Image (tube, rainbow, N blue to C red):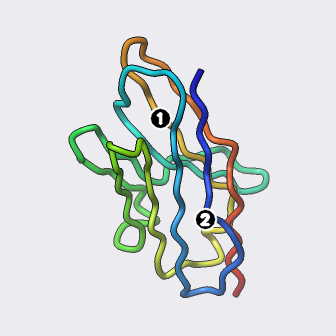
Amino acid sequence: QVQLVESGGGLVQAGGSLKLSCAASGTFFSIDTMGWYRQAPGKQRDLVAGISSGGITNYADSVKGRFAISRDNAKNTVYLQMNSLKPDDTAVYYCKITTRFPRFDYWGQGTQVTVSS
């Protein structure tokens, strides 16, 4: 069983910053990819940023240059530094990890990020 605990969401004014964290615990062999997704009301859940086990990152076009994803493999934790936040960034943010052997996806419970104008 794997548990993901997210933290760092909240309310911030436009132009501000937040840093999300997601720590994985439980029984698993190792973690392959880690990522952050977001879902705004009435919209689908979309990828925000992902990071491979080797540190290769990818971002949604809407957040490039503003958000940065990183991971600490020793702590099984993934981070999302969000800068220059905009009201359009308002959403519930979910972390996802993909484990190896077996290969399986696990999701966090979600953390609300609200950006006021």
Relative to 15, residue 90 above or below? above
Nearer-the-camera pick, 100 or 66:
100
Classify 10 Å Cα crowding around label 2: few (below 14), some (14-19), many (20 and above).
some
Give the labeled residue for mark 2. Answer: 8
Q: Amino acid at mark 1?
A: Ile
Q: Quadrant of residue 85?
A: bottom right
CA–CA distance between discs 2 and 1? 18 Å
- Give the mark, 2 or 1, whose residue is nearer the N terminus: 2
Nearer-the-camera pick, 6 or 56:
6
Q: Residue at x 65, y 77 (%)?
A: 87
Relative to 113, residue 83 above or below? below
**Residue that protrudes farthest toward the right in the picture:** 42
Please state the total of marks drawn on the protein image: 2
Nearer-the-camera pick, 92 or 27:
27
Give the number of the mark in front: 2 or 1: 2
Quarter of the C terminus within the rendering: bottom right
Secondary structure under the numbered disc 2 in the rendered image: loop
Relative to 7, residue 43 above or below? above
Q: Which mark is residue 97?
A: 1
Q: Quadrant of residue 30?
A: top left
Q: Quadrant of residue 1?
A: top right
Q: Residue at x 42, y 12 (%)?
A: 102
Q: Which mark is residue 22?
A: none
Classify 10 Å Cα crowding around label 1: few (below 14), some (14-19), many (20 and above).
many
**Residue that protrudes farthest toward the top in the picture:** 102
In this rendering, position of residue 112 left or right of residue 62? right
Q: Residue at x 61, y 65 (%)?
A: 8
